[in-house]
Image (cartoon, rainbow, N blue to C red):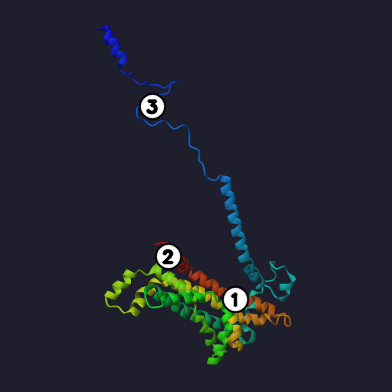
Amino acid sequence: MSTQTAQTAQAAPSAPPTTAPGGEPAPALGAPPARQGKRKQAGRPGRSGAMASRAVVNAVLLVAVLYTLMPLTWLLIAATKNHADLFGTAGFGFGEFHLLDNLRAVFTYDDGIFGRWLLNSLLYSVVGSLASSLISVAAGYCFDKYEFRGKGALFGLVLTGTLVPTVVITLPQYLLASEVGIVNTYWSVLIPALVNPFGVYLARVFSEGYVPGEVLEAARIDGASELRVFRSISLPMLMPGFMTLFLFSFTASWNNFFGPLVMLNDHHLYPAVLGIYSWNQVVLQYPEFYSLAITGSLVAVIPLALAFIGLQRFWRSGLTAGAVK
């Protein structure tokens, strides 16, 4: 009996120890093994590398800001000087404050011709940009939402127009305007600005991102005509894109120099950019025109700044068109 009991005790499995060597509690049965230390974080850049990258990016941004703001800063400071301080002080040094006198001289010279130039620039830029943007949005909308024969080839032809520099076609445009008889008129500057191949391409991208086809189909089922669908449904949806195109076109038209230089002979039709250039052409014979040209340049920058500030909520949202579905 005692022999059988001893054999049974030897055959029975022994209970697991409750403590591990060294006095630490042993892990329970079926429990995963304890992690040995902390994992090494591999593949992450060190803090010093991240700080170096951030410093490089900030340095590049600072250089870009200085490159952009330094000419404007010089222009603002120079516009406050009279003729003697303009040449007798450092470029970024201040002299006596004569900004109001310079502005008075700019707007009273030659019976206020500079004010006429500003109105001409507003006419070319605002009217031309509104018409150009509307045509571009309508064309891009048609390329996106309608199917017709030769659509791909025609759109490829439009894209080819983006590869042709504007300066190259200015002389042919002048010859055509001369044949029609609109040289030295407002139309000679306004009509060429109506065609914008890049605007058509951009408007098609806007239409793909902003105008769902289901909404148009619902409007057609309700009996709306295609013109009504575009005017009442699609155009309000495309308004951010329209304002973005308008801002781009407005900037290009306001800074347009070579086109008016070729098309116009009457200085009463000049835009502000061309008028300031005509003042700058005579500064060697008449040095007092330096102050007129500098102050006029400062005034000509103000409408562009106001346009960007006033329309920034439109072009910011327009630039992200199609980025998120």
Image quadrant in which the C terminus is located: bottom left
Is 90 left, or right, of 40 in this rendering? Answer: right
Q: Nearer the viewer, mark 1 or mark 2?
A: 2
One can see residue 36 in this view: yes
Earlier sequence position, callout 1 versus callout 3: 3
Kind of residue at badge 1: Val
Marks 1 and 2: CB-CB under 8 Å?
A: no
User: Which corner quadrant of the image does residue 72 belong to?
Assistant: bottom right
Q: Which residue is mark 1?
A: 299
Q: Which mark is residue 322?
A: 2
Where residue 271 sits: x, y (%)?
Answer: 58, 82
One can see residue 243 in this view: no
Where residue 210 sits: x, y (%)?
Answer: 39, 68
Residue that lies at the very extreme toward the top in this rendered image: 2
Q: Nearer the viewer, residue 92 or 16?
A: 16
Q: Secondary structure at mark 1?
A: helix
Q: Residue at x 66, y 74 (%)?
A: 98
User: Which corner quadrant of the image does residue 189 belong to?
Assistant: bottom right
Q: Which mark is residue 137?
A: none
Q: CA distance from mark 1 to mark 3?
A: 81 Å
Q: Residues within 10 Å of mark 1 (few under 14, many from 20)?
A: some
Residue that lies at the very extreme toward the left in this rendered image: 1
Is 82 left, or right, of 239 in this rendering? Answer: right
Q: Residue at x 34, y 76 (%)?
A: 229
Q: Residue at x 27, y 74 (%)?
A: 221
